[in-house]
Amino acid sequence: MKRVLIIIPAYNEEENILDTYKSIIDYNKKYKTNYDVIVINDGSKDNTSKICHENNIPVIDLINNLGIGGAVQTGYKYACYSNYDIAVQFDGDGQHDVNYVKDIINPIINDNAELVIGSRFIDKKAEGFKSSFSRRVGIKIISHLIKFASHKKIYDTTSGFRACNKKIIKDFANSYPSEYPEPVTTAEIIKKGYKVEEVPVKMKERQGGESSIKAWKNVYYMLNVSLYLLIIKFRRYK
């Protein structure tokens, strides 16, 4: 049986982290699964750490805020050190549904993919939260840029709900971008020759708190992601 670790990066998620963790534990009990969990508390200024410790939630407390890239890489380092077969990124804000974890890890278990992305945009008829109109436009632009850089179409380019096998766990543990990790790592992984697939998922709106991505950052985000992907286009990978 494959050992599966769910990595939950969390920054100021006191309103959501306990419910998120309980949803996974309840799922394990109901379906007899054994998904392990590690919360990466990314220097939160609220009670995220306290709630984790009081409720015996496995947590790594980072002294400083490293940002999403540093927090997620910490999770991959833990997964690599602990010899997990599959690592799943899972947001701490209540947007991701644990019922879809099986769909995301099955292509890896069946050796059909090495990185699997939970996508909101494959099944266009599916209901669920798909983010704001401006962000959807940005996602489409990034999708075209990833195809230009890697020659593969990725629909949900910013999805933080994804899983990878042991090879990619080691790769991410050794090197992971501090900014724009999802689109950048997806393009890099494809360029390195790994098999990447998307599976349809439904997502929910954030259940509480505030997103770390602010509206004023959108133009800055798009310009920098575009630059990174252009660099990936012309970089040679072994």
Image (cartoon, helix red, strand yellow):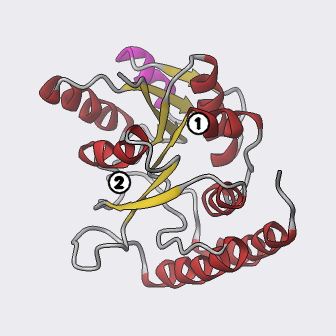
Q: Mark 1 packing: few (<14 Cα in 10 Å), some, or many (20+)?
A: some
Q: Quadrant of residue 32?
A: top left
Q: Residue 111 versus residue 215: which sits nearer the camera?
A: 111
Q: Mark 1 or mark 2: which comes first in sequence?
A: 1
Was residue 102 drawn as part of the magenta stretch in this picture?
no
Kind of residue indicated by mark 1: Lys
Closest to the observer, 55 or 76? 76
Residue under label 2, please give it.
95
Disc 1/disc 2 C-alpha distance (Å):
21 Å
Looking at the image, residue 206 lies above or below residue 149: above
The N terminus, quarter of image: top left
Mark 2 residue element: loop
Q: Identify the image quadrant of residue 76.
A: top right
Left or right? Give the position of 221 relative to 119.
right
**Disc 1 designates what residue?**
45
13 vs 33: above or below: below
Q: Can residue 47 be seen in this snapshot?
A: no
| Rendering coords of residue 205 (x, y %) | 32, 61
- Please name the residue shown 55% across and 54% down the image: 195
Label 2 CA crowd tier, 10 Å (few <14, some 14–19, many 20+)? many
Q: Amino acid at mark 2?
A: Gln
The span shown in magenta is 48-56
Query: Would residue 163 be found to the left or right of residue 192 on screen?
Result: left
